[in-house]
C-alpha cells in the first residue's frame, strides 16, 4: 500500500503538487516526529480511499527544507490540501481521519 503514497521533494514539488490537475494532500513530516508516525496510517488510508481522485504524498521536512520554508511549516505534522496549485486547507498537529476526508470530499465537489 505504500506505493500509493507519493514522495514529494524540493525537486519534484512544483510538477507533482503545484502543477497537478487533481487535488493533492501533502503530509509534512520527519522521521524523529512521534505524532507524524501516528498519523502515517491515516495518510495511507486516505490515499487508498481517494485513489484516482486525489494525489496523496509526504514531504520529509528535514530533507526538503525549501518547500517546508515556502509553505511556512513551523510544526509537524502539518498536512496541506492543494487544488490548482493553491492551498485550500492547512491542518497542524494530529487530526482525525474524518477531518481530512471531509475536506477532500468538499474540494472534489468544487
Image (cartoon, grey):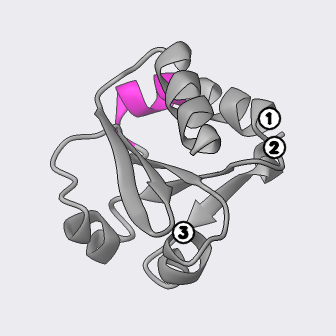
**Left or right of 76 on screen, residue 18:** right
Q: Residue at x 58, y 25 (%)?
A: 101
Magenta span: 32-40
Residue beneath disc 2: 51
Residue 48, numbered label: 1
Magenta stretch: residue 104 in it? Answer: no
In the picture provided, is 98 more to the left or to the right than 77?
Answer: right
In the image shown, does 89 or 69 lie closer to the viewer?
89
Residue 1: x and y in percent read 84, 39
Residue 48 location, x and y as percent? 80, 35
Residue 97 position (above or below residue 7): above
* 102, 46: nearer the viewer: 102
Report helix, strand or loop for mark 2.
Answer: loop
Q: Tell me the residue that label 3 is attached to.
A: 17
Give how far apart the Cα atoms at labels 2 and 3 are.
15 Å
Mark found first going from the N terminus, 2 or 3: 3
For label 3, the SS is: helix
**Residue 34 magenta-highlighted:** yes
Q: Does the CB distance between marks 2 and 1 fall below 8 Å?
A: yes
Local secondary structure at mark 1: helix
Counting from the top left corner in percent of width and height, residue 91 is at 33, 34
Residue 51, placed above or below residue 55 = above
Point out the tag, 1 or 3, that comes first from the N-terminus.
Answer: 3
Give the CA separation, mark 2 to mark 1. 5 Å
Amino acid at each position: 500500500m505504500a506505493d500509493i503514497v507519493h514522495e514529494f521533494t524540493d525537486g519534484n514539488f512544483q510538477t507533482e503538487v503545484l502543477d497537478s490537475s487533481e487535488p493533492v494532500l501533502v503530509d509534512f513530516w520527519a522521521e524523529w516526529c512521534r505524532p507524524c508516525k501516528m498519523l502515517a496510517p491515516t495518510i495511507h488510508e486516505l490515499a487508498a480511499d481517494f485513489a484516482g481522485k486525489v494525489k496523496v504524498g509526504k514531504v520529509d521536512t528535514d530533507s526538503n527544507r525549501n518547500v517546508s520554508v515556502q509553505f511556512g511549516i513551523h510544526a509537524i505534522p502539518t498536512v496541506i490540501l492543494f487544488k490548482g496549485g493553491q492551498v485550500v486547507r492547512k491542518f497542524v498537529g494530529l487530526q482525525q481521519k474524518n477531518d481530512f476526508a471531509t475536506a477532500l470530499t468538499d474540494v472534489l465537489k468544487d
